[in-house]
Image (cartoon, rainbow, N blue to C red):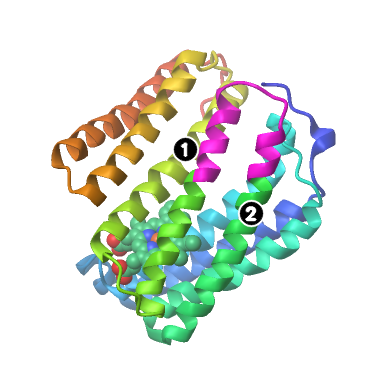
């Protein structure tokens, strides 16, 4: 799993267009903070807060993560994306426009901005999920990194579907249970997508770049299993109002997150790379 096949890499323009766009969303988040940081620090629910959250998570992070995955999947786990230029030409503008309209909608640009954001983000995210999912499903590789990358892409699909359901509450006035949807959206987006992806990428790059021993295959399977059980448990507990299951799921989530940190720090204490980064 650790050998890289650079000949499978897509043209540089494919990831680059995502990487070049992402910092502008970081700048926009900074401008919103400079304009009204009082609102952002005062309330989690202030429009400015939700706008900054999504300028960073959809505008910056999702943009970079999608571009990086298009480049990394074929090289690191043999998951070849067919027609990468066409995929980038659909996914990149949809994520960019949708990622800009979503915070504008939160900041008061009106339901039309939220509706357009929902359509564009649905196109961008689900086109990416289908293409990445197919590539990962067809990969001949075996081992935890491939498994975890598959879980991360599935996590993105669930997080985005919940996000789009939330937008429908605001943009299309659908009557859905807002509180439960927000909690589940945040859980799947942060643990099911972002942390799961971090896990898969750490399995590949921590040993490679820092010259540490590899994550053991058992750890490689147990950590995502803990995160996935926590997420499934929370989803059931919150929809069926089962408090003991929610507590159990929280314990599993804490075990998964802290287990990842502890294992990674232990590996890093055994690094053979002399330079301190
Ligand atoms: C398809 C993309 C997405 C859409 C359409 C979307 C939409 C939404 C909506 C409508 C809300 C509720 C806002 C409110 O109550 O005023 C929300 C909350 C939230 N979303 Fe997303 N979201 C998306 C992706 C993401 C991603 C990828 C992440 C993180 C990796 C994320 C993290 C959050 C967080 C943390 C909150 C809670 C905000 C707070 O408490 O201030 N979202 N999202």
Q: Residue at x 44, y 67 (%)?
A: 29
Q: Is residue 23 above or below residue 257?
A: below
Q: Quadrant of residue 262?
A: top left
Q: Is residue 2 above or below residue 56?
A: above
> Whereabouts is ligand 1, in terms of quadrant?
bottom left
User: Is mark 1 in CB contact (under 8 Å) with mark 2?
Assistant: no
Q: Mark 2 highlights which residue?
A: 128
- Residue 172: percent from the left, percent from the top? 40, 79
- For mark 2, does the 10 Å Cα neighbourhood hold few (<14), some (14 to 19), or many (20 or more) residues? many
Q: Residue at x 55, y 65 (%)?
A: 122
Looking at the rendering, the stretch of residues picked out in magenta corresponds to: 133-154
**Disc number for residue 196:** 1
Q: Is residue 232 magenta?
A: no
**Would you say the magenta stretch is mainly helix, strand or loop?**
helix
Query: In terms of secondary structure, where does tag 2 sit?
Result: helix
Residue depth check, mark 1 versus mark 2: number of the one nearer the observer? 2
- Residue 134: percent from the left, percent from the top? 68, 43
**Disc number for residue 129:** none
Q: Is residue 83 above or below residue 30?
A: above
| Camera-side residue of 152 and 243 | 243
Q: Residue at x 51, y 76 (%)?
A: 101
- Residue 76: percent from the left, percent from the top? 69, 31
Q: Is residue 56 visible?
A: no
| Camera-side residue of 254 and 229 | 229
Q: Disc 1 or 2, which lies upstream in sequence? A: 2
Q: Quadrant of residue 17?
A: bottom right
Q: Is residue 189 above or below residue 28?
A: above
Instruction: Please count the marks in the image.
Output: 2
Q: CA distance from mark 1 to mark 2?
A: 17 Å
């Amino acid at each position: 799993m650790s050998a890289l096949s650079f000949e499978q890499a897509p043209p540089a323009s494919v990831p680059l267009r995502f990487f070049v766009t992402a910092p502008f969303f970081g700048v926009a988040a900074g401008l919103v903070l400079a304009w009204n940081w009082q609102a952002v620090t005062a309330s989690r629910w202030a429009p400015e807060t939700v706008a900054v959250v999504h300028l960073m998570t959809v505008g910056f992070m999702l943009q970079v993560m999608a571009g990086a995955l298009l480049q990394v999947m074929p090289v690191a786990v043999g998951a070849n994306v067919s027609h990468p230029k066409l995929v980038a030409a659909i996914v990149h503008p949809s994520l960019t426009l949708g990622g800009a309209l979503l915070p504008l909608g939160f900041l008061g640009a009106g339901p039309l901005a939220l509706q357009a954001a929902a359509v564009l983000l649905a196109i961008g995210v689900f086109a990416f999920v289908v293409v990445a999912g197919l590539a990962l499903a067809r990969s001949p590789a075996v081992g935890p990194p491939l498994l975890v990358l598959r879980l991360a892409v599935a996590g993105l699909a669930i997080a985005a579907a919940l996000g789009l359901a939330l937008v429908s509450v605001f943009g299309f006035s659908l009557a859905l249970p807002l509180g439960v949807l927000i909690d589940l959206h945040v859980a799947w987006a942060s643990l099911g997508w972002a942390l799961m992806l971090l896990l898969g990428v750490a399995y590949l790059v921590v040993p490679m770049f820092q010259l540490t021993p590899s994550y053991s295959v058992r750890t490689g399977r147990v950590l995502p299993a803990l995160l996935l059980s926590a997420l499934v448990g929370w989803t059931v507990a919150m929809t069926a109002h089962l408090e003991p299951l929610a507590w159990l799921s929280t314990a599993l989530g804490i075990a998964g997150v802290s287990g990842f940190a502890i294992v990674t720090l232990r590996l890093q204490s055994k690094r053979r790379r002399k330079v301190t980064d």
